[in-house]
Image (spheres, rainbow, N blue to C red):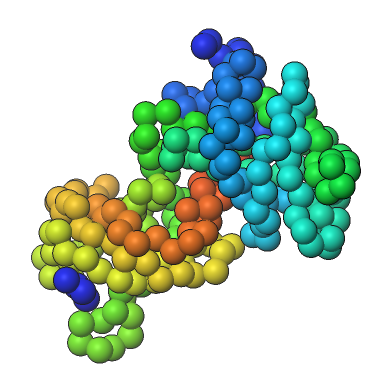
Amino acid sequence: MPDHASPAPTASPHAGNLYADERFMVRNRHQIRHLLQAMIDQRAMVTVHPDGRDQSFPSAVLEVDGDSMVLDASPVPSVNNTAEAAAGLLCFGQVDKVTVRFQLHGHRRISREGHVAFEVELPDEVYHLQRREFYRLETPVGDSPYFELPDPEGGTPIRLRVLDISAGGIALLLPPEQTLLNLQSRYTGVLDIPESTPFSTALVVCNLRQQKQPNGVEMTRAGLRFSDLPRGADNTIQRYIFRIDRLRKARSNGD
């Protein structure tokens, strides 16, 4: 309830073209170095997910030298063992408050100034939302997030499938004469994303419009923006988007 540079023509052999919006993919080596150096200059934190799993550790880009870079390791030895054994490291960060994400492969553990770090080749491609836009993913019916809202009558929470999702918000589909959501009202509920722990978040209703379904039935499509995402939730959303994009790419290639 309301609580008032030209990119290279080929993609990475590791990651492939995993992103639906090519406008934000950077493959030019000079531009990649520039983005990584900016992360150093801005002391940007990098969240690292070994093999793209839910477990992560905070890190930072320590050095960029030619075609290689050095990534800070975790102070926890067991986490470093997991990272070292991983086939790849999925990394999320920001440059000028704009999302950056990339994959690293072939990393090796080194000692840098008495501390553990990972040396690795520069990523083949970096996803960078240069125009401060959010890539919105249309969710698959069988693997989509759900948003649970409290029942105004005090009954079982109302569970709604998320039609699309981005780091900026979600879209829901409701009955045409719905009275659950009001424009510009703020609602707090639970977002349940597959393969992740559900989390509570607040959203504001930005638009409500009628939408005819393939069967001819009129429904109301609600667009909501995140008002108060909890810490780490952005990474959870990005990892879900990354996973679905990867599955769709594999299917399109017949894998």
Residue 147: quarter of image: bottom left
Residue at the bottom extreme, as displayed = 154
Q: Where residue 21 sits in the image (x, y, percent)?
A: 45, 30
Residue 134: quarter of image: top left
The foreground one among 140 and 115 is 115
Q: Is residue 81 left or right of residue 226?
A: right
The foreground one among 131 and 237 is 131
The answer to whether one can see residue 253 in this image is: no
- Above/below status of 128 relative to 225: above
Q: Is residue 217 left or right of residue 116?
A: left
How many numbered markers are drawn? 0
Q: Where residue 67 sits in the image (x, y, percent)?
A: 75, 21
Q: Where residue 103 sits in the image (x, y, percent)?
A: 67, 37
- Above/below status of 156 relative to 76: below
User: Who's the residue at 13% across and 59% down the image?
Assistant: 183
User: Who's the residue at 84% across and 41% down the image?
Assistant: 112
User: Who's the residue at 68% across and 56% down the image?
Assistant: 57
The answer to whether one can see residue 117 in this image is: yes
The foreground one among 115 and 79 is 115
User: Who's the residue at 73% across and 51% down the image?
Assistant: 50
Q: Is residue 229 left or right of residue 196?
A: left
Q: Where residue 137 sits in the image (x, y, percent)?
A: 42, 44
Q: Quadrant of the N terminus?
A: bottom left
Q: Quadrant of the C terminus?
A: top right
- Above/below status of 237 relative to 41: below
